[in-house]
Image (cartoon, rainbow, N blue to C red):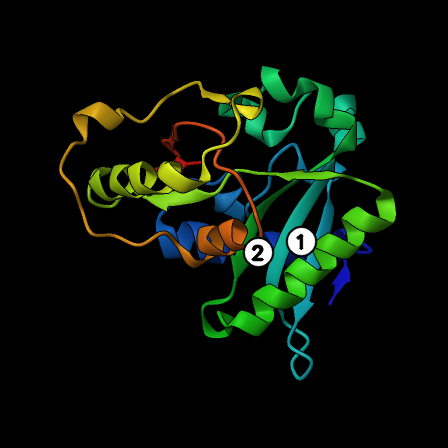
Amino acid sequence: MSFARSPGEVLEAQRLRDRVFAEGMGARVPGAERGIDCDLYDAHCEHLLVRDTGSGEVVGAYRLLPGPKALEIGSFYADSEFDLTRIQHLRDATVEIGRSCVHPEYRTGSTIAMLWSALVAFAALQDYRYLIGCASLNMADGGCAAASIYRRLVRTHLSPVEYRVFPHCELPIAALDRDVDAQPPALIKGYLRVGAYICGAPAWDPDFNTADL
C-alpha cells in the first residue's frame, strides 16, 4: 500500500475506478471513453493505492483532497452536491476523502482496513482534524431503499445542527414513503462505527444514480 508517486500510478487508480463505477454500477463517469474515471480534482489529490503483492495490480483506491488544495481550486468535490456553508470554517483543518473503490475480487475487511489505517495516518501526520466526503446509497429501486436507510440512520447518527449541510438536488424523501428493509452499504456502516455523522438529507447524483450522504 502506498500513495501514487507518478501520473502512471494515478492512471491505474482511475482505471480501477472506471471498472468499479462505470462497468460495475453503470455510472456516467468523466473519461469513460478512455476507460478511466477522471475529473478536475484528481490533479490536486493524493491517491492512496492498495496492490496485490503477487501481480502488482491496483485493487483498492481512495483519493484525498486536503483543505488547502481545495482552496486553491475553489472547492471540495462535495461542494458540487451540497451547500457546505456551516462547515466553511473547518476547511483548512479538513481532508476530503472520496472515490473509494475496491476490485470485486478483493472486497474483504482487510483491504478496507488497510485503506483506513493509511487515511488516519495521513490525517494525523499532516495535522488534519476532520474527514469529510460523500458516501452513496444505491437507487436501483428508484430511491425507496435509500430513503428508508436515511430515515433510520438519522435517528442515531445525525450531526449537531452546526455541522449540517444542504443538498443542491435533494432526494425527495417525503415522496419516497414506502418503507424498505434495506441495509446501509458496508462503507457507510464502517464510517458510522468509527463515529461519523450524517450531516443532512441526501443529494441525488444523476451521473451515478445514487443518493449521497
Relative to 164, is 142 above or below? Answer: below
User: Could you tell me residue 121's position as x and y percent?
Assistant: 78, 56
Relative to 69, is 61 above or below? Answer: below
Residue 15, quarter of the rendered image = bottom right
The amino acid marked with disc number 1 is Leu
CA neighbours of label 1 inside 10 A, class few (<14), some (14 to 19), many (20+): some
Residue 27, quarter of the rendered image = top left
The one nearer the camera, 87 or 69, is 87
Q: Is residue 160 visible?
A: yes
Residue visible at 59% across and 41% down in the picture: 38
User: Could you tell me residue 122's position as x and y percent?
Assistant: 79, 51
Which mark, by number, is residue 112?
A: none
Which of the image's four quarters has the C terminus? Answer: top left
Q: Is residue 59 visible?
A: no
Is 33 situated left or right of 170 in this image? right
Please, which residue is most extreme toward the bottom here?
54
Mark 2 and mark 1 in contact? Answer it, CB < 8 Å: yes
To which residue does mark 2 refer? 15
The one nearer the camera, 104 or 199, is 199
The amino acid marked with disc number 2 is Arg
Is 127 situated left or right of 190 in this image? right
Residue visible at 52% across and 55% down in the picture: 193
CA neighbours of label 2 inside 10 A, class few (<14), some (14 to 19), many (20+): many
**Callout count:** 2
To which residue does mark 1 refer? 11
User: What is the secondary structure assignment of the residue under circle 2?
Assistant: helix
Is 207 situated left or right of 191 in this image? left
Is 36 situated left or right of 53 in this image? left
User: Could you tell me residue 24's position as x and y percent?
Assistant: 38, 57
User: What is the secondary structure assignment of the residue under circle 1?
Assistant: helix
Please, which residue is most extreme toward the left here?
178
Residue visible at 26% across and 27% down in the picture: 173
